[in-house]
Amino acid sequence: MINTELFKEENREIEDRFNLSMERILSIPYEHSVKEPYGRFFDETAAFISDVKRLFDIVETKSIQTYNMEQLKELNAMFFDGLLQGNYEKSFANPAYAAEQMGDEFGPILSSLYVMMRQMIQYAYSQRKLYITLYCELFLEIYSIFEDEESITYDAVRNAIYWFKKDYTEIFLKDNISEMVNPEFCCATKLVMESNLSDLRYLYMYGKCIGINELGTAAYLNTLSDEEIEKIASVYTEGYRLGFINTGKDISKKKTVEIRYNIGFERIVRAAIDNFAKMGLTPIIRKGMVSSSSFNRQYEFDHKFDEAIYLDKGYVNRMLEVARTSFEEYKDMASLYAGPAVIEVFGEEPFDPKKCDKAFSLNEEQRKLKVEFSREYGQIVNKYIKDEERSFTIIAFPIPEIGDNYTEIFEEVTKINTLDQRMYGGIQQKLIQTLDKAEYVRVTGRGDNKTYITVAMHDLMNPADETNFENCLADVNIPLGEVFTSPKLEGTNGVLHVSSVYLNGLNFKDLELTFEEGKIKDYTCKNFDDEAENKKYIKENIMFNHEFLPIGEFAIGTNTVAYMMAKKYDILYKLPILIVEKMGPHFAVGDTCYSWEEDVKTFNPDGKEIVAKDNSITLNRKTDVSKAYFNCHTDITIPYEELGDITVVTREGWELDIIKEGRFVLRGTENLNDALDGH
């Protein structure tokens, strides 16, 4: 079970307010004091909250532990089936439907209110009476506005939500920061370590939507031997350990590791926790970082910018104030935080979002405020959790939704995650030896791909001891298979084009970025008929509302085995960027791979120091750190089938081909073509 003992004292203190608010809400469906078109919304939301109360009670009394599998599935369906495709179209969670039923003025904001209330599902499982009470009181405040027809104004509703968010920042954000660094505040470790993982009822104790991916993953992992599970977990945890060693960081100074994973992977996580314990690390598992597969990504997309209701300068300042005081309070624990160890998943059907005119969006001032908050919050975090002292690792596995070949693909991915590091390290070193001769590298597309870009390289003052490129094997980013650098901005010009790519869970069709002196000058795609919508889509989901982004990374992926696995099972469009970036040349927009730790010396296996860590923007950190970082880094890969040539152009004017017509031609790298050619 989730550790529900954490909040017993807090629950006793809030008991009276909890009972009063619940008693009031339970009476709403019988009062009919709010007239249509709003009455049904409040009645249905009150009924939902009453279901949350019943859920809270069965968790509190532990009677949920007696539920059989069918009962748990029914309980889960009661809270999530209403938002599945087919039902969402007639749900108040849908801004378009809410606007249709209650008008354009109040429909979207009440839809957002309903989505806020849904957070109580998890709070019922974790027994957070305080959180449930605060949300109930917000609901009642807005209900009272609609009881009096003369008091109903948009500003009254908006202000209620605004002050709720602002006033309780000290509770919600402070708890979130505590949960990040304090293992005693961790709810889920007990579930992972003490549950009978062969009894899949445990999956329903997180308070998340449980579907075929969670059930199928856990069932499949239960067919593997302890030795097979340990082998998978060891790749993951050893990559984490090597991340410290390869960057010269001292893991012995750290005491906690944050584990992020998808529900269903508990057998691997349990083995990983044992491995981390041998390194002296205690697990932190945050409820917000344990995921289940999305039950409706359109729902999530429609509510992505609900913060537009309350995002203003005062709110941002309050968030930053609480962040500073909270991190200062928890600074000792923050200094012991080693960084995240992440298990990503892939295989969900690709998501092509549909524009919802009734959904909230940020205005220009709010976009700037969000950028400002992201920048300032990043600086606060780095002050207490220093990048130059921490590390991370990421590994990815498929989930059953990937198709009938799920188990075969899982086995193939496991093999890819354990490829021969010595062989790839040698091949990649040959690539680096040639790339280090470059004044710039020219990358072109093939066929309909319009890529033509020249990427400027840094000057090497001492080529015998220095290199521009990192030889990336299986440590922080698993699987192995790339060489990468932070290019010079000045002299980097041209067009990057990809016919279709999935970034941050969203599909971009015919994505085209134009660079001038290393910065994005223009951008477009073909997701929508309206060019303005295409630009907005990129601005929000790749640019993250910045006016421009620099090129932060240029890399050549060498994992042709992964590429051909993707082709064999026709899953290229389902793979995460973690694997895709190893499957061809890629460019990252935003920060470099070395942000916040540019002065930490790192070396390749051949002993050469990697010196290409800064660019003309990151150098601002020495005078005004607010101008140095963007707090985003998005990789965009050109697949081999769209790739033309990659050519090194030396300062003497010589041209040395690395790849020609999508095949490796540099001497000593030809073995990478074996997988491409089916050998």
Image (cartoon, grey):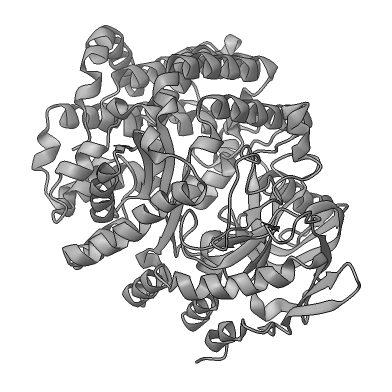
In percent of the image, x 43 and y 42: which residue is there?
340
Q: Quadrant of the N terminus?
A: top left
Q: Position of residue 522 (x, y in %)?
A: 85, 53
Looking at this rendering, what residue extends furthest in the right direction?
653
Q: In this image, 362 relative to 503: left or right?
A: right
In percent of the image, x 91 and y 71: which residue is there?
652
Q: Position of residue 651 (x, y in %)?
A: 88, 67
Q: Nearer the viewer, residue 313 or 493?
A: 493
Residue 55 appears in the picture as rendered:
yes
Looking at this rendering, what residue extends furthest in the left direction?
66
Q: Where is residue 286 in the image (x, y as percent from the top left)?
A: 36, 35
Q: Position of residue 451 (x, y in %)?
A: 80, 70
Q: From this view, report whether residue 503 is shown above or below residue 450.
A: above
Q: Nearer the viewer, residue 80 or 500?
A: 500
Q: In this image, 141 relative to 552: left or right?
A: left
Residue 571 appears in the picture as rendered:
no
In percent of the image, x 17 and y 27: which residue is there?
60
Q: From this view, report whether residue 587 is shown above or below residue 81.
A: below
Q: Which of 340 and 619 is in front in this view?
A: 619
